[in-house]
Amino acid sequence: MTAQQEIKLESLEVGVYNLEGKRVATVRLPRIFNMLVRPDLIRKVFLALRTSRLQPKGADPLAGERTTAESWGVGYGVARVPRIKGGRRAALVPMTVGGRKAHPPKVEKKIRERINRKEKRLALFSAIAATAYRFFVQTRGHKIDNVKELPIIVTDELEELSKTSDVRQVFEALGIWEDIERARKRVRIRAGKGKMRGRRYKKPKSVLIVVGKDRGIGKAARNMVGVDVVEARNLNVELLAPGGHPGRLTVYTQSALAVLEEKLGGGSNEQ
């Protein structure tokens, strides 16, 4: 465990900013923001969430075996592999053209990671807490040189924005537009055949906007590269720690904090 993980927040009192980036009030954060950050547990839960979407797959049991090929046996001066009737061409076995696979995928394979309910809940607490530490946010690669304090708390007016241009002005006022530009410049074309299967581009993650209720901000921000909008009741580790790495740059509204306090509270596992 690193020294940074052992550091507690100096104060749970943080500023609330309006859409012009001015501090207009203070608010007390829920106690979950002062929990110990557990990157190992966050990674474990992230993998459990990711594998839960995998679909079992397997090969046709008779693939490559629909042939009457049989081995000639010994005494013919040729290898004893199965050969098609009326010819010398080998078939059926894995080393032959059109033969079966040696080890095809099987639907019986266990591809889903299981996770305990309390571990999943503790990892969510930990991922939320990581958004309040500059160390974890900078380690993920976010540009926060112009951000005054973390976590970023904004008035509920943010939830009502309906234009992308308005959201950009707010991000510029809060000092986080630089991170949006970072994500936009790093969009690249995926290597391999995935580019032909509906996932042509790889896009870095940028700002996560957590709201109490989506009243228009979802449509206003969805066209920005790397930006996600989620209601506080649907918050999960995969959104807070993409790739299993904690510390995503996150913007909370005041109503979102109220939902987190009501839904999650301080947690019985507070460190």
Image: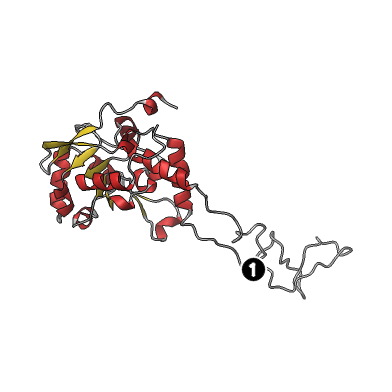
Give 127 or 80, whichever is nearer the viewer.
Answer: 127
Q: Give x and y (percent) for residue 140.
A: 34, 36
Q: Could you say which quadrant of the image residue 176 lies in?
A: top left
SS for tag 1? loop
Give the residue furthest to the right.
75
Give 157 or 208, whichever is nearer the viewer.
Answer: 157
Q: Give x and y (percent) for residue 92.
A: 71, 66
Residue 235 visible here: yes
Q: Residue at x 83, y 68 (%)?
A: 72
Give 83 or 5, whichever is nearer the viewer.
Answer: 5
Split into 4 quadrants, where in the image is the N terminus? top left
Q: Amino acid at mark 1?
A: Ala
Q: Is residue 175 left or right of residue 193?
A: left
Q: Give x and y (percent) for residue 263.
A: 32, 48
Q: Residue at x 39, y 28 (%)?
A: 5
Give 155 or 144, whichever is nearer the viewer.
Answer: 155
Residue that badge 1 annotates:
63
Q: Give x and y (percent) for residue 125.
A: 37, 40
Split into 4 quadrants, where in the image is the C terminus? top left
User: How many callouts does the rendering have?
Assistant: 1
